[in-house]
Every structure is written in structure tokens, then in C-alpha cells.
Image (cartoon, helix red, strand yellow):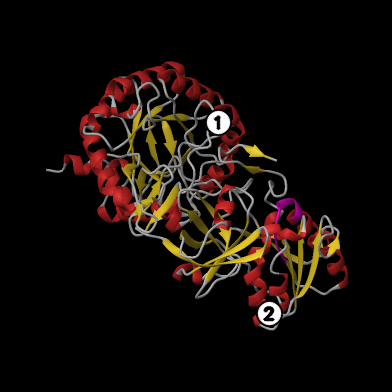
């Protein structure tokens, strides 16, 4: 029988399907439920130093047949108010990965340190938030800043640290390399693709923030390409994310170099059980293709002659 | 990408409450108790129960916050965004129902009352609000053939008492299979307690801060089970509510912080 359990950066996952940050993870209860539904690990909503209400609505809409467009604006209760949510999430019995954001490397390490104190088993750095020092840029677009943030957090916590990278850059593999060189234990790719929607009758962008991020089916080819490029440049484990709806999607990411996949938008169509469904579809496919494990199938597309 | 439509007419229910009509194919198929996300371009987008479904749909608002005030000021021809319908409707499986609507929650029970009366089933509607300016649809329910009892906190309309007093009285007196309720959560929590004590089934329609409406953003998830109000709800049964530890006690604001 095929075994889909996987290990990455020392985290042991019973299933390679991970609840992606920003999806059903505003509360410990919801993360606990995702774990009960078969997720191999859960990633918290991105947490920052201070409470934030995020952007006004519309902040998350469905684009028919394309995916989900969102600009929720990092709403979170603030790191001082999430201890209980983390403890509730931990009841699910799977690793809880804390997603953190900040405007400066110090803020990242401060929040990451507190999340580690609450019992998070790994940290995922949300590097696609606006950079506080310089306007109009994202921390995750500048290798020097990525290096600084990863270093600051690694100095602060003794946990595996994943750098989550955005696809809206010319050289995502270069950024991954910078993150790993600075001490990152793994890479999560990709965050949402910058996008927008306009309503013709209203004659204006639909999102209150005008521009947002696209997730879901439409971005799977973008995510795959990113993971494939990163896998050629770094040996660190990769969590593939972007348009994973089925076991086949998961296996494509694994063959591109991922050790695990994160699932987000697919919850909308396939419900809470999406994790268990993807896992069993993946098992069947691995079996059919003659791979006894996730590891056996990993990177086969990268090394294919 | 378009999900907007135009307002076909606006009906003034009373000085504070307006019903905004529009046509929307998908929303027209909504079942009683389902909701739509309503976008007022340039203002906000909020979840609202449909107070009418079919060839013409409607939502009914009391001018309370920014969004509802902007909606109350809408005119025929104005652009309005509608997504949905979303969520779990009232089960509508019971024969003799006591409907309990508080404030703008009255909108949620409207289509349920009419659907129930269409099947010639007996129904009693208890409406409660702070003052008469927030009571609406009383005549609509009477026209549908329901027995209507009105209560206001200030006695400006109907009886001066809490709607929950009427519920207790009706359940003591009457043979009901179920209570369906929508309104302020503290009121609903009391209604659920009364129904449980009377051993009558109960269904309550909850409201929480929402962003997506289709089950992924997590803003509306409940403690302890992680139920999503937009998917597993907004209708929850009395049995389910016993496990929802935050019901009647607290909710979360837009940042995710608990608010009593």
C-alpha cells in the first residue's frame, strides 16, 4: 500500500495536504476542524504585531470558472490575542505552522518569537506584504530584504522556518536561493497572483482595495512553474500551493519538486473533506504510476530526460 | 466579470425600513433562510437575507450602519451587486411552526412564512422590535394567513413586552412542532432555551461578520466546532446550537478579536 506521509524540515505529516494560510484559519476551532478533516498540518492566518481589521468588503469574491480573488488586507487579532487560538488548533493533533508578517525584520522576529512561545511547530514568513520602509514594494521582491527577515527570525526561534514567496517577481528561484542561504529550512510557493476584477455596470473595480490576489484553478500552472524553477535551485523542502484541487494536482506539484501541498480555494468546491479526498486520490495515482511514496515521485519531472 | 443588477423598485415599509427589489436569476432560486452578499458600489458589501425570491427578489434593510443607510437611500435603476444565494436554508419540514422575528431578522423569516402558508399549514408569527418604526411585514404575514403577534419594547405598537414572553405563552398554549427564529442573538438564545425547555424543535438563523460568503475565508467560523455560518449555517438547529459554545455569548469582529 502506498504511504503518503511525508517529512519536511523535520515536520512529520501524516498526509501531504496542508491547510493554506488565510483559509478557514481565523480561529483555533476552524483549524482544529481542518485537522479533523484530514489536513496533515495547518497554517494560521498571517499574524502581525498589532490588531488589524483589514480592508473593507468586497474583499473576497468568486470569479466563475477562474478561482477566487481576494484583498482581505491581513486582518488579524494581533499576536498578543492569538495564544488561545493556537492552543485550540493544537487539539487537532497535527503540526500548527504560524504564518507571520511584519513591516521590518525586527517585527517578523518579534511576532515569530511569540508564536513559537505559544507552541507553533514551524514558522511561515508571509513575505508578500507591503514593505513599511519603502512604499509600493513587497518585502518578498527584494533578495536583500528576504535575507534580512529570514536571518532575524532564525536568530529568534529554534523552529523550522519556511519562506512563502509571491509569484509576482521576475526570478522566484533567486529569491528562494537567498532565503535558503540566509537559513530558511523550506520554501512555500506560491502566494496569490496579483489580479483584479472590474464590474462594468458599476464602472469600478469590485474589490474595495481595487487590486488583490488570485488563487484557485487559474494559478496552478503559475505555481507549478515556480516550484519547478525553485526545485532546480535549492535542495530545501518545498510546499507547493496554488490551485490544488485533486490528487492529480498534488502529484503534479510533487513531481515538480514539492514535498507537500497546501490547499486553499478548493475547500469552496470540495468542502472540509477536501484534504482526505486529495490524499486518497493521490494514493491511488501514486499506486497506478508505480511510486511507493511521495518521496519516490518527488522531482521526477525536474530530472526527466 | 459582472454580478451586478439594477434596482427595480424600492418600497418604504416604514420611516426606517426599505425593501430593495431587483432581478437576479440565481438569487431567484433561493430557498427560505438563504442569504446573498449585497454590494453597494463604493460603500460596502454585506450579507443579507432575501426577503423575497423568485422572478423578482428583494432584501429589506433598516437604516442602521453605513451600508444599510446607503442601501435605504437607493433608487430605481441604481446598480447593486448580488452574489449567492449562499448557506443552509430553514428545513421547512415541520407542520406547525411558530416564527419569531426580531428587528431586521424579520426579513429572514418572511419567505419561510409565505412558503409555509402556501402549503396551507398553520403558522403563528411573533414580531418584536424596540419601537414600531422597526416593525415591518405585519400586514404581509396577515395577508398570507398567519396569526401575527407584535411586541415592542416601548409599547408603541402591539404589546409592551419582550417577544420572548410571547414565545413562552404560545408554546405553553399551542401545539407547535417547531420554532424558527431570526433576530438579535441574545433574543435567539432565549428563544432556543424556551423551545428546548418546551421540548419543541428550534431553528435559528445566525449572523456573523463575513467576507467571502462561500466558505473559505474563515471570518464566520464558530467555536468550538469551526462551523461556518455561511455554509453549515446560517440556519442551525437547537441540537447543533448546544455545541456552539459562542452562541448568545460572543462573536468576532473584523480583526478576529472576540467581542461580547
Q: Which chain carries label 1?
A: A
Classify mark 2: helix, strand or loop. helix
Q: Nearer the viewer, residue A127 or A130?
A: A130
Are labels 2 and 1 on one chain?
no
Q: Position of residue A75 (x, y in %)?
A: 50, 37
Q: Which of A112 and B12 is in front in this view?
A: B12
Q: Residue A43's mark? A: none
Q: Residues within 10 Å of mark 2 (few under 14, many from 20)?
A: some
Q: Can residue A297 be seen in this view?
A: no
Give the labeled residue for mark 1: A51
The answer to whether A141 appears left or right of A207 in the picture is left
Asked whether residue A230 is drawn in magenta, I would say no
From this view, report whether residue B244 is shown above or below residue B115: above
Furthest residue to the top? A155
From this view, report whether residue B9 is shown above or below residue B62: below
Q: Position of residue B158 (x, y in %)?
A: 83, 65
Q: In 3D space, how far apart are the residues under numbered discs 2 and 1 (Cα atoms)?
A: 48 Å
Q: Is residue A109 visible?
A: yes
Quarter occupied by residue B17: bottom right
Quarter occupied by residue A175: top left
The answer to whether A160 appears left or right of A66 in the picture is right
Tag 2 near tag 1, CB within 8 Å: no
Task: Give the extent of the magenta segment.
Answer: B180-187
Q: Where is residue A271 in the image (x, y as percent from the top left)?
A: 47, 56
Furthest residue to the bottom? B120
- Name the residue: 58% across, 57% down: B72
Give the labeled residue for mark 2: B117
Q: Which chain carries label 2?
A: B
Q: Which of B156 and A291 is in front in this view?
A: B156
Q: Where is residue B97 in the image (x, y as percent from the top left)?
A: 74, 72
In what quadrant of the picture does the C terminus of chain A appear?
Answer: top left
Amino acid at each position: 500500500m502506498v504511504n503518503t506521509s511525508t517529512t519536511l524540515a523535520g515536520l512529520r505529516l501524516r498526509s501531504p495536504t496542508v491547510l493554506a494560510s488565510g483559509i478557514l484559519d481565523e480561529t483555533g476551532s476552524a483549524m482544529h476542524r481542518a485537522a479533523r478533516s484530514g489536513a496533515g498540518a495547518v497554517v494560521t492566518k498571517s499574524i502581525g504585531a498589532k490588531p488589524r481589521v483589514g480592508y473593507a468588503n468586497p474583499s473576497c469574491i468568486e470569479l466563475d470558472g477562474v478561482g477566487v480573488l481576494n484583498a482581505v488586507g491581513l486582518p488579524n487579532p494581533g499576536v498578543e490575542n492569538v495564544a488561545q487560538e493556537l492552543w485550540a488548533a493544537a487539539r487537532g493533533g497535527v503540526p500548527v505552522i504560524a504564518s507571520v508578517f511584519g513591516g521590518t525584520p525586527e517585527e517578523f522576529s518579534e511576532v515569530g518569537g511569540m508564536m513559537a512561545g505559544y507552541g507553533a511547530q514551524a514558522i511561515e514568513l508571509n513575505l508578500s506584504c507591503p514593505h513599511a520602509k519603502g512604499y509600493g514594494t513587497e518585502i518578498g521582491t527584494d533578495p536583500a530584504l528576504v535575507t534580512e527577515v529570514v536571518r532575524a527570525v532564525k536568530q529568534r526561534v529554534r523552529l523550522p522556518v519556511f519562506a512563502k514567496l509571491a509569484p509576482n517577481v521576475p526570478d522566484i528561484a533567486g529569491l528562494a536561493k537567498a532565503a535558503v542561504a540566509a537559513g530558511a529550512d523550506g520554501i512555500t510557493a506560491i502566494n496569490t497572483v496579483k489580479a483584479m476584477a472590474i464590474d462594468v455596470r458599476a464602472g469600478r473595480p469590485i474589490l474595495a482595495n481595487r487590486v488583490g490576489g488570485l488563487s484557485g484553478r487559474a494559478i496552478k500552472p503559475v505555481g507549478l512553474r515556480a516550484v519547478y524553477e525553485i526545485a532546480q535551485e535549492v535542495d530545501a523542502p518545498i510546499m507547493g500551493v496554488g490551485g490544488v484541487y485533486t490528487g492529480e494536482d498534488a502529484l503534479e506539484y510533487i513531481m515538480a519538486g514539492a514535498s507537500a501541498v497546501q490547499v486553499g480555494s478548493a475547500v469552496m468546491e470540495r468542502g472540509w473533506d477536501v484534504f482526505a479526498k486529495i490524499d486518497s486520490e493521490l494514493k491511488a495515482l501514486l499506486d497506478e504510476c508505480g511510486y511507493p511514496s511521495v518521496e519516490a515521485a518527488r522531482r521526477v519531472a525536474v530530472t526527466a530526460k | 466579470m459582472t454580478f451586478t443588477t439594477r434596482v427595480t423598485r424600492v418600497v418604504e415599509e416604514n420611516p426606517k425600513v426599505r425593501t430593495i427589489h431587483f432581478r437576479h436569476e440565481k438569487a431567484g432560486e433561493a430557498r427560505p433562510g438563504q442569504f446573498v452578499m449585497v454590494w453597494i458600489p463604493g460603500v460596502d458589501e454585506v450579507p443579507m437575507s432575501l426577503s423575497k425570491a423568485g422572478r423578482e427578489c428583494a432584501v429589506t434593510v433598516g437604516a442602521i450602519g453605513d451600508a444599510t443607510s446607503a442601501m435605504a437611500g437607493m433608487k430605481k435603476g441604481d446598480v447593486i451587486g448580488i452574489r449567492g444565494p449562499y448557506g443552509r436554508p430553514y428545513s421547512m419540514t415541520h407542520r406547525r411552526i411558530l416564527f419569531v422575528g426580531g428587528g431586521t431578522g424579520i426579513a429572514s423569516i418572511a419567505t419561510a412564512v409565505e412558503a409555509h402558508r402556501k402549503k396551507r399549514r398553520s403558522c403563528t408569527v411573533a414580531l418584536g422590535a424596540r419601537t414600531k418604526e422597526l416593525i415591518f411585514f405585519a400586514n404581509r404575514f396577515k395577508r398570507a394567513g398567519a396569526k401575527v403577534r407584535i411586541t415592542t419594547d416601548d409599547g408603541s405598537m402591539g404589546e409592551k413586552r419582550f417577544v420572548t414572553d410571547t414565545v413562552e405563552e404560545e408554546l405553553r398554549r399551542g401545539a407547535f412542532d417547531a420554532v424558527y427564529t431570526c433576530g438579535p442573538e441574545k433574543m435567539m438564545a432565549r428563544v432556543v432555551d424556551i423551545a428546548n425547555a418546551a421540548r419543541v424543535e428550534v431553528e435559528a438563523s445566525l449572523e456573523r461578520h463575513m467576507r467571502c460568503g462561500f466558505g473559505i475565508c474563515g471570518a464566520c467560523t464558530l467555536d468550538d466546532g469551526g462551523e461556518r455560518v455561511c455554509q453549515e449555517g446560517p440556519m442551525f438547529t437547537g441540537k447543533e446550537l448546544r455545541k456552539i459554545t459562542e452562541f448568545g455569548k460572543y462573536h468576532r469582529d473584523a480583526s478576529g478579536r472576540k467581542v461580547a
